[in-house]
Amino acid sequence: MIRQRLKMPGLIVLAFASLTGIWTGCQKDPMNNLSIDETRLYITNYDTTAQFSSYKTFSIVDSVALVSNTQGYNRELTPADQELIQKIISLMEARGYTLVDKSQNPDLAINVTKVSNLYTGVSVYPGYWDNPLYGYWDPFYWGYYGYSYYFPPTYTFYQVSQTYYTIDMLDLKNAANNNNQIKVIWNAQIRGEAVDDPSAVDTEIQAVFDQSPYLKAS
C-alpha cells in the first residue's frame, strides 16, 4: 500500500497547484503575489508495508540524472545537486543509517532525478459572439439591420517551464525475495519556482524528511 503526503508553505498554492506554467499576454499571473518559498510543493509517498527500521545501510548516486525534453537524458552535478546529495546523506545518517559504497551491498539505494521541460504553444480565443467574456451588445442599435458584428479571434502565445526534483529510495535488501524486482519504498518530489537554487535545496530536503518521520534505522 502506498501512502502519500503533501505539504506546501503557502496554503494558497492549493488553488494553483494544477497550473503548469505562466501565461503571457494579457492573462493575469496568479503566482505573482506568492513568494518563491510559497510556490514550493513537497510530495512524499511511501510503502506502508516497508519496515524502515530493518534497513541499516544505504548508498546514493554521485550525480543527478537530468531528464529534459530539450536536453535529452544526461547526468550532471551542479552546485545545487552537490548540496542536495550531501543534505540527503546528512539526514539519512542522522536517522541512524550508514553510508556505504554501492559495491558493499547496501540495504537501500537512493536515486535523484531532475526533470526540466520546456513547452510552448498558442491559445486561440474565439470571436466576439462565441466568447461570453465579451458580454452582449445589440447589433441593431445603430440601425444597420441585417448586419452583424465581426470580432476577430485573438491569439495568446505561451511558454511553460517546469523543473522539479524527484528522489527515489529503492529496497535492495529484499530484491531477491520480490521476484527479482526492486521496489521503490519511498519517493519525494520537490516542485515550485527555482527548486534548483543552491541556497534552497537544504531547506527543501529538510522539508521532505520532516514529512517522513518513519525514515529511521532504529
Image (spheres, grey):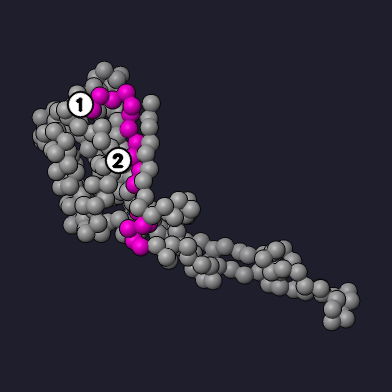
Q: Residue at x 36, y 57 (%)?
A: 38
Is disc 1 placed on a helix, strand or loop?
Answer: helix
Of 193 and 10, the residue lying toward us: 10
**Position of 210 relative to 134 (above/below):** above
Q: Of label 1 and label 2, which has the lower sequence position?
A: 1
Closest to the observer, 54 or 145: 54
Q: Nearer the viewer, residue 214 or 132?
A: 214
Q: Residues within 10 Å of mark 1 (few under 14, many from 20)?
A: some
Of the 4 image quadrants, the one containing the C terminus is top left
Can see residue 184?
A: no
Residue bearing the label numbered 2 = 211
The quadrant in which residue 20 appears is bottom left
Q: Which amino acid does the dot numbered 2 rest on? A: Gln
Q: Is residue 107 left or right of residue 178?
A: left
Where in the figure is residue 49, as x and y percent of width and height? Answer: 32, 23
How many discs mark residues in the rendered view? 2
Near-viewer residue (100 or 217): 217
Query: Which residues are the magenta region?
Result: 35-52
Which amino acid type is marked by label 1? Ser
Q: Residue shown at 40%/59% (left/top)?
A: 161
Label 2 residue SS? loop
Residue 84 visible here: yes
Kindly report the distance in space between the C-alpha atoms of the residues bearing marks 1 and 2: 17 Å
116 left or right of 209? Answer: right
Mark 1 lies on residue: 53
